[in-house]
Amino acid sequence: MLIKKPEDIKASEITEEKTYFSRRNFIRAGALAASTVATGFAYRQLFVPEEKTVVSQDKILDLKPSSVPLNLNGDEPTDFIDITNYNNFYEFSTSKNGVARAAKKFVARPWTLTIEGLANKPKTFDLDEIFRIAPLEERTYRLRCVETWSMVIPWVGLPLGKLLEQVEPLSSAKYVTFETLVDPERMPNQKTGPMSFFSVLDWPYKEGLRMDEALHPLTILAVGLYGKVLLPANGAPIRLVVPWKYGFKSIKSIVKIKLVDRQPVTTWNLEAPSEYGFYANVNPKVSHPRWSQAEERRIGEYSYRDTSIFNGYGEQVASLYNGMDLNKYY
């Protein structure tokens, strides 16, 4: 293979920067479109996975939530096998049914989570240290995907606010940002360096919340589900869960949290701002540009059901958005 030295390359042979990024975005758009088409068939027809990576609950480490389980909506939880085998986690695969298989060998320990930025006591926490900050609780929450499918998941975790208290946020901290692990060796669908041209997203995956959203009692960091330690396909070892927002806000495999004073750039909002707003509150009256959000299909069910504003948690969270135009701040 002939490799030209820099001095042998003519200026006319160099791809213009705007052309390079246009081609890159075309490739990425194609991959995302293929994923969306596949999703359309999955949630508009019966749920028939390509191949389930069946996980036995008996072989997963038990967690022991200390409080009475919380289920505000009284929904029946989705089957454990469906929850652990039907996932969006592009770091492993763009196929929902392929994530569990691709993530099967992911090792989530040792693990640290760093909190930095506008805080009196920025700190890096070991996972076991996080487990000791507050008693683990079981919270059964609805999960509504922006793609119009949904689940009901009995999470195990602790309030995010309890962790943030440990670093003493400054009054100037108005937002909280989150980042997922970047490790192509462990997350095979991440591509960095020259191969990043073909990457479906820019890594690390980033998300953010307003400070009052982060401190709301319903916002948790999940470390398990169904009383078992969180599996890689579901965001092991620690992920965010914000039940009144679309699922892409609930970032997985978190390694960094930063307290900032301005609204942060987030992955999907940067990728397609007209489709994925920063707030991403579940709102049946605000359609996605390519589909209605008025209805959803619960995984494991055949028929559609109406989607509720704030995913059914309006009584608890609507006051956070008093005076806001939810059509503009979607």
Image (cartoon, rainbow, N blue to C red):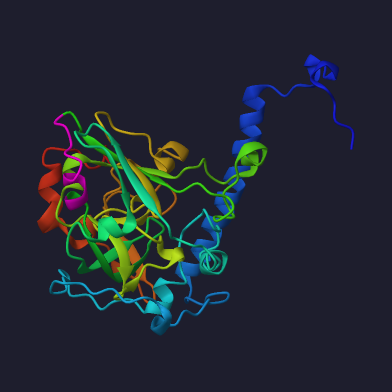
Q: Is residue 27 left or right of residue 230?
A: right
**Residue 272 in view in this figure:** yes
Above or below, 325 against 109 in this view is above
User: Main SS of the magenta segment?
Assistant: loop
| Quadrant assignment for the N terminus | top right
**In the image, residue 164 lies in the stretch drawn in magenta:** yes
Q: Is residue 288 left or right of residue 10?
A: left
Task: Determine which quarter of the picture holds residue 309.
Answer: bottom left
Q: How many marks?
A: 0
Residue 98: x %, y % from top left: 56, 66
**What span is colored magenta in the figure?**
162-171
Residue in view at x 19 percent, y 33 percent: 120
**Residue 293 in view in this figure:** no
Residue in view at x 83 percent, y 22 percent: 5
Residue 243: x %, y % from top left: 25, 58
- Towards the viewer: 55 or 198: 55
Residue in view at x 53 percent, y 49 percent: 183
| Quadrant assignment for the C terminus | top left
- Towards the viewer: 175 or 44: 175
Residue 124: x %, y % from top left: 32, 44
Residue that protrudes farthest toward the right in the picture: 2
- Towards the viewer: 147 or 219: 219
Residue 251: x %, y % from top left: 37, 52
Task: Determine which quarter of the picture holds residue 63.
Answer: bottom left
**In the image, residue 152 lies in the stretch drawn in magenta:** no
